[in-house]
Image (cartoon, rainbow, N blue to C red):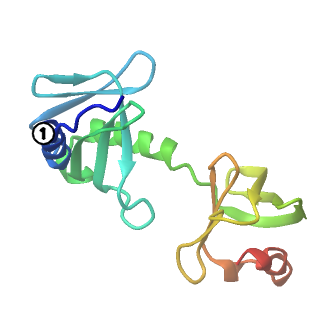
Amino acid sequence: MQEPFQLEQMEKETKEMLKLRYLTKENCTFQRTPGGFVSLTVGDEHYDRIQVFCTFPFTDRYRCVSIRESTEKAKEIGIIQDLNQDLDAETVAMIQEQISLRYFTPVITKIKSVKEEYGFAYFDVETDHGPCRFAIHMSGSAVVHLSETRVLFLDLDENRFEIPDLTALSTKEQKKISVFL
């Protein structure tokens, strides 16, 4: 049996979702938890664990940083307008660490081989963090063009790998990945 539509409840939830709260060193406190996560206190509200999301992860990583609850819905708690101006140095380092973990993106420096099989492509590459092998779906959104020469690969586990400048690759390497571009 279907529940009756609750207009008032929906309006209340919508108003709450659209409320924008800016987080600064004056109105909130971030702390590291014993488990290595980050907690947040804003006024009389406390969040044992938060998640950090960049609204512009590829162009302006430290502006308009979204702080969200660490739940399945990831409800937004507030926005840090400018990480380097709105928080103290210790908190900035803590938030930057969380951003680095969430947006870890090794840079591909060399393409050793690419093998296509059954709708998947298997990459064997060198990155700025060492050798790596990963697989992508041949169809879909596994390859994201960030500019004419900057490409992002999303593997089957949603890990990111970046080629900041395709023209910096050798001709042989460019041929290996040309089918994906």
**Nearest the eye: 169 or 64:** 64
5 relative position to 105: left or right = left
Going 42% across and 59% down the picture, which residue do you hit? Answer: 57
Q: Position of residue 128 (x, y in %)?
A: 67, 56
Going 41% across and 15% down the picture, which residue do you hit? Answer: 34
Quarter of the image for residue 149 reads bottom right
Quadrant where the C terminus is found in the figure: bottom right
**Nearest the eye: 55 or 118:** 118
Quarter of the image for residue 95 reads top left
Quarter of the image for residue 56 reads bottom left
Q: Secondary structure at mark 1?
A: helix
Q: Position of residue 22 (x, y in %)?
A: 15, 47
In the depicted structure, whether residue 98 falls above or below residue 174: above
Residue 64 can be seen in this image: yes
Going 86% across and 65% down the picture, which residue do you hit? Answer: 114
Q: Position of residue 100 (x, y in %)?
A: 48, 46
In the depicted structure, whether residue 178 falls above or below residue 74: below
Q: How many marks?
A: 1
Q: Position of residue 130 (x, y in %)?
A: 74, 50
175 relative position to 146: left or right = right
Q: Which residue is mark 1?
A: 12
View extreme (top): residue: 34
Residue 20 can be seen in this image: no
**Nearest the eye: 90 or 33:** 33
Going 28% across and 31% down the picture, which residue do you hit? Answer: 3
* Label 1 Cα crowd, 10 Å radius (few <14 / some 14-19 / many 20+): few
151 relative position to 139: left or right = left
181 relative position to 97: left or right = right
In the depicted structure, whether residue 11 falls above or below residue 36: below
Quadrant where the N terminus is found in the figure: top left
Give the residue type that dot 1 points to.
Lys
